[in-house]
Image: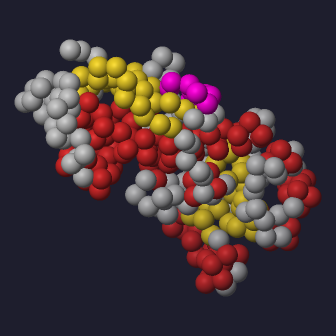
């Protein structure tokens, strides 16, 4: 596949950002004020819990899942040595990010104070379920593309969770598209309307794009618009809601000579991806990878006491 511009290797967010996201989620759930668990007499005992997959999927967010338990243990006075001295450890043979799981699989084990396990489980599962859903959706599209084009996400992410959701796309085999409005100049229909057309818009933003060394993308809806934008020397054309025939026609127009990158977007579904992959475009972007996935169903079950 052709190397494309304006993409990122979105790994696990840095420690400070990750801890901030998790802390907000734990505060929302009042995880350190768990009135259902705290009074129970066995809450300080070390127990083992397991995560059961209730459907097939792709695991993503395992480091996030583990960090949730660690942070609850630290706050409860475990891993920092001020309390029981016991933290929470997550393990899973072969069950790291990107692992395929099937319904009925035990995918992760957690060992720690029972109170920590029960107070952290919901927040930890919420992250795991959503990120695994994104990774699974991405994997299905990547498989459908059969290596012929890049599968990219968009900025249609959950507010505050973009770093995690883009990381999940990469776990699923996808490519992280521009991170924010500051990473690429992308002229879409409203920008073109505001500026007075493709040529006018490109003229107005080109100097700033060059000085910032940012790729310049223009959204086009017709063959004629693609030809016009191509003549202006933009870096990428966003082919919006086009038929397979229209995409192939544009690819044929530019031929093998140096040309802008071609991105298919709009009305892109899993069913359409194999056809899009045959047109010769370089990448396809899908908002559905992050904005409308259904969480993978995992459950957390407390098992045997790990120590007497």
Q: Position of residue 121 (x, y in %)?
A: 36, 39
Residue at (62, 61) in percent of width and height: 216
Residues in magenta, as a range: 98-107
Residue 181 % position (x, y)? 49, 63
Indicate whether residue 96 is drawn in magenta.
no
Image quarter hosting the C terminus: top left
Which residue is located at x 61 percent, y 30 percent?
A: 103
**Looking at the image, is 62 positioned above or below residue 187?**
above
Q: Is residue 226 left or right of residue 61?
A: right
Where 42 falls versus 134 (above or below)?
above
Q: Check residue 102 for magenta coloring.
A: yes
Q: Is residue 33 visible?
A: yes
Question: What secondary structure is the stretch in magenta mostly built from?
Answer: loop
Residue name at image x 47 percent, y 37 percent: 299
Total numbered circles: 0
Relative to 121, 217 lies left or right: right
């Amino acid at each position: 596949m052709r190397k494309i511009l304006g993409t990122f290797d979105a790994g696990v967010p840095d420690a400070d950002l990750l801890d901030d996201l998790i802390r907000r989620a734990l505060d929302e759930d009042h995880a350190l004020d768990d009135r259902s668990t705290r009074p129970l007499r066995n809450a300080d005992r070390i127990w083992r819990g397991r995560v059961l997959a209730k459907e097939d999927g792709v695991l993503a967010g395992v480091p996030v899942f583990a960090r949730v338990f660690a942070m609850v243990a630290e706050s409860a006075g475990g891993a920092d040595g001020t309390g029981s001295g016991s933290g929470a450890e997550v393990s899973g043979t072969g069950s790291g990010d990107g692992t395929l799981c099937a319904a009925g699989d035990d995918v992760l084990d957690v060992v720690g104070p029972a109170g920590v396990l029960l107070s952290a489980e919901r927040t930890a599962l919420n992250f795991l379920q959503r990120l695994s859903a994104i990774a699974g959706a991405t994997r299905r599209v990547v498989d459908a593309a059969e290596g012929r084009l890049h599968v990219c996400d968009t900025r249609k992410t959950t507010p505050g969770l973009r770093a995690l959701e883009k990381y999940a796309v990469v776990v699923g085999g996808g490519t992280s598209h521009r991170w924010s409005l500051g990473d690429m100049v992308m002229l879409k229909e409203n920008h073109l309307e505001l500026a007075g057309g493709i040529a006018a818009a490109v003229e107005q933003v080109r100097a700033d794009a060059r000085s910032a060394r940012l790729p310049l993308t223009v959204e086009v809806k017709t063959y004629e618009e693609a030809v016009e934008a191509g003549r202006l020397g933009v870096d990428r054309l966003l082919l919006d809601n086009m038929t397979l025939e229209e995409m192939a026609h544009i690819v044929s127009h530019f031929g093998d000579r140096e040309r802008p990158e071609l991105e298919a977007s709009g009305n892109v579904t899993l069913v359409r991806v194999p056809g899009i992959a045959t047109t010769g475009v370089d990448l396809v972007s899908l908002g559905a990878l992050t904005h409308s996935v259904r969480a993978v169903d995992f459950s957390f079950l407390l098992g045997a006491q790990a120590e007497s």
